[in-house]
Image (cartoon, helix red, strand yellow):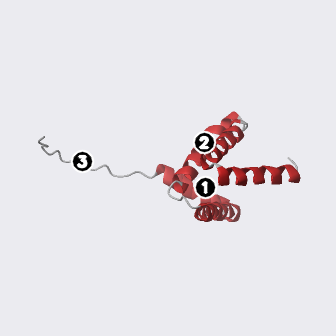
């Protein structure tokens, strides 16, 4: 997609948001779904999982500026993690492996009588 097509698509989405927010949400959802479906199959489940996390974090924000700020915050969180991996890949791998093998002590729950 060239620059003019991208600008046109952005303007179309802005106009749609202003005139019909429900149609905007449907189109946004459809575009994301299409993009994920075009990924190689081995990446799709992970992409849907990430998209779900993004949607859940943004769900509480209605104001578009606040949503954008929240998205930027998520971007910078991931950028910092990416930078950490670049700076110390072995340390990050060791940390992840340690977390995977960590176990928790399971505490027995005492039963109690519940009367209805």
Name the element at disc 3. Answer: loop
Residue drawn at point x = 11 percent, y = 42 percent: 115
Residue drawn at point x = 71 percent, y = 41 percent: 35
Residue 80 screen position, x and y as percent:
65, 65
Of the two numbered discs 2 and 3 in the rendering, the one whose residue sits closer to the viewer: 2
Dot 3 and dot 1 residues touching (CB under 8 Å): no
Of the pair 75 and 109, the residue shown nearer to us = 75
Read off the residue under disc 2.
48
Mark 1 crowd level (few <14, some 14–19, many ≥20, 10 Å Cα): few
| Quadrant holding the C terminus | top left
Label 2, label 3: how many angstroms apart (C-alpha)?
36 Å
Label 3, label 1: how many angstroms apart (C-alpha)?
33 Å
Circle number at residue 93: 1
Circle number at residue 108: 3
Mark 3 crowd level (few <14, some 14–19, many ≥20, 10 Å Cα): few
- Which residue extends farthest top? 41
Q: Mark 3 or 1 closer to N-term?
A: 1
Residue drawn at point x = 66 percent, y = 40 percent: 30
């Amino acid at each position: 997609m060239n620059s003019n097509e991208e600008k046109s698509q952005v303007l179309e989405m802005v106009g749609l948001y202003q005139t019909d927010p429900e149609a905007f949400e449907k189109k946004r959802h459809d575009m994301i779904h299409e993009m994920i479906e075009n990924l190689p199959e081995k990446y799709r489940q992970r992409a849907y999982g990430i998209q779900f996390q993004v949607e859940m974090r943004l769900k509480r924000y209605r104001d578009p500026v606040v949503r954008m700020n929240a998205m930027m915050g998520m971007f910078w969180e991931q950028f910092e993690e990416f930078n950490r991996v670049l700076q110390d890949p072995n340390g990050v791998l060791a940390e992840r492996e340690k977390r995977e093998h960590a176990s928790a002590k399971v505490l027995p729950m005492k039963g109690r009588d519940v009367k209805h």
